[in-house]
Image (tube, grey):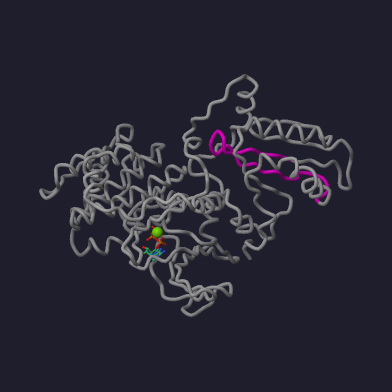
Amino acid sequence: MESKGAVLMNRYELGRLLGQGTFAKVYYARNLKTGQSVAIKVIDKEKVVKVGLKDQIKREISVMKLVRHPNVLQLYEVMATKRKIYFVMEYAKGGELFKKVAKGKLKEEVAWKYFRQLIDAVDFCHSRGVYHRDLKPENLLLDENDNLKVSDFGLSAIAECKHQDGLLHTTCGTPTYVAPEVINKKGYDGAKADIWSCGVVLFVLLAGYLPFHDSNLIELYRKISKAEFKCPNWFSPDVRRLLQKILDPNPNTRISIAKIKESSWFRRGLKSKQIKSETGSKDVAPLDTDTASGSCKSNGMATEAKQELAKPTNLNAFDIISISAGFDLSGLFEEPCQKKKAKFTSRKPAAVIISRLEEIAKLLRLKVMKTGAGFMKFEGLKEGKKGILSIDAEIFEVTPSFHLVEVKKSNGDTLEYQKLLKEDIRPALQDIVWTWQGEEQQQQQLS
Ligand code: ATP
Ligand code: MG
């Protein structure tokens, strides 16, 4: 269907096939208006829906907007047709990093540069609560200036599914980059698993071959589980020490990124090199990291009770919800956009959001029927055109002081609801809302 020269959505002219993964094909393309080169990843919607990933993917796509970093491949936009999803991404002209390694091991300082860029990218994403979970050579690309670009960050739903698949059927290649705890299918910490993969990458860059390798899969798993690897004799003592700490089979004792950055090998390079492309935080969504690390504690029984109430829909660490204006994905899977739903993000604690919603309800003479678990229900006192108006609000915790709230009509007349939302609810929420999602981004809606 995607043939060379075809024009997508009147916007992009498709070029050659750049590569193919488990779920997708990636094409070179050009923005017809600006002439900009991009890469377009085409995913079969049916496959995604079949494996039950659609909600998670929607969330995770939005996450990618959060992670703007010079070493993270940028996602420009997402488009969809009935059958396909198109990720329009930054084009990495230099192709895969590992093509370089295929020609032979890299010099220590060259490996150091890429490793540093990798750690920078991973550290940045982790600070935003985003984990990769599928760090591997195919996802490490280079731009025209030979800078590393990590791709597929935020697409952990796809990665997850693939891992399961890959592990069960082994058709997706051997999981040589995957951490032991992921293989053992224990619940795992995304950050620690990513760190492990970074260690494997570093080893490969310096050695020119994999640290764990065996044609027998069971044997390979065993080696990974025990972190059985041997550094070749040209590895310096500094880097050996670092690798031992990264490739620690126990995620609890495995070195953290902060400690990697303090390690002598990492710093030695730093002293001797002029570092370019410092982590730029200027174009980053202002989600502060100390709230992301959960340092915000509340006092007082009432507040705690309310927070308890707001906890429930357990968004895991991978589920940071889109907060970025102009990036609404609600049209991605649902056919016409549902006008019944409104979403906003807030940087206030749950207790504040709940109190505000209660105040608004009082003002609007709506009955508050809390159903617990971060879920609130409001009902009108009088019958409207189509019965009693009923509005649900659901609060999802991203961090203790960062929430996503979904407000939707569950009964009654849609027009009546929309009027209430527009004229009363939204204005009353104004000072606690960080961004609204939805209505005002119609132009971004996907056809
Ligand atoms: P998997 O499906 O297991 O994730 P993958 O990462 O190789 O494997 P894709 O992300 O679909 O799969 O990418 C396929 C290939 O296309 C990559 O291996 C890479 O060589 C190429 N590619 C992907 N994104 C870009 C890009 N932005 N610029 C240039 N080449 C790319
Ligand atoms: Mg990829």
User: Above or below — where is 9 with respect to 222?
Assistant: below
Q: In this rendering, would 348 be left or right of 124? A: right
> Ligand 2 is in which quadrant of the figure?
bottom left
Residue at point 71%, 40% (across, down): 429
Residue at point 27%, 44% (across, down): 221
* Residue 94 percent coordinates (x, y): 33, 67
- Which span of residues is magenta-colored? 392-414
Toward the left, the furthest residue is: 233
- Asked if residue 407 lies in the magenta stretch, the reply is yes
* Residue 127 percent coordinates (x, y): 44, 42
Prevailing secondary structure class for the magenta stretch in the rendered image: strand
Toward the top, the furthest residue is: 301
Q: In this rendering, would 21 be left or right of 381? A: left
User: Above or below — where is 64 with respect to 397?
Assistant: below
Which of 390/273 is in front?
273
* Residue 425 percent coordinates (x, y): 76, 42
- Asked if residue 265 lies in the magenta stretch, the reply is no
* Displayed quadrant of residue 312: top right
